[in-house]
Amino acid sequence: MSKRTGRVAETDSTSINWRQHGSSVTLYDETDTDAWIRMTFEAGTPPEHRLYMICDDCGGVFAQRTTPGRSSVCGDCGATFDHRRD
């Protein structure tokens, strides 16, 4: 069970509407029923092909806007993940 706590983030950007359905997430526009996208998490997908990151430690879900570099840091719990392929 996740032990994350809620917090308020100050931002000037528009909020994103989303719903979670099992292993998938749906992003949608409330004002346009035709504007939506569903993303499904598949275990084992390499980080460079994911649209979002799921933290293995706390379960946090984050949009992945770029291909990950050598490592990632969770924005909620601070866990680090090494992506290097040696």
Image (cartoon, grey):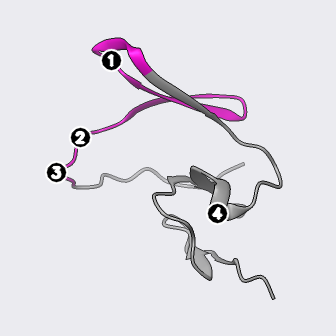
Q: Amino acid at mark 1?
A: Glu
Q: Nearer the viewer, mark 3 or mark 4?
A: 4
Q: Earlier in the sequence, mark 4 or mark 1?
A: 1
**Cα–Cα span, label 2 and label 1:** 13 Å
Q: Earlier in the sequence, mark 1 or mark 3?
A: 3
Q: Along the line of sight, which residue is nearer the eye, 9 or 41?
A: 41
* Residue designated by label 1: 30
- At horizontal 58% and vertical 74% (from top left) the residue drawn is 72
Residue 12 higher or lower than 56, as above or below: above
Residue 38 higher or lower than 80, as above or below: above
Query: Residue 12 has which mark?
Result: 3
Q: Is residue 22 magenta?
A: yes
- Residue 46 lies in what quarter of the image? bottom right
Q: What span is colored magenta in the figure?
A: 11-35
Q: Is residue 80 visible?
A: yes
Q: Amino acid at mark 3?
A: Asp
Q: Is residue 58 visible?
A: no
* Residue designated by label 2: 14
- At horizontal 62% and vertical 83% (from top left) the residue drawn is 70
Instruction: Determine crowd level at label 4: few under 14, some 14-19, many 20+ residues with C-alpha closer than 10 A.
Output: few
**Cα–Cα span, label 2 and label 4:** 26 Å
- Residue 78 lies in what quarter of the image? bottom right
**Cα–Cα span, label 3 and label 4:** 28 Å
Using residue 78 as the reference point, say whether residue 48 is left or right of it.
Answer: right
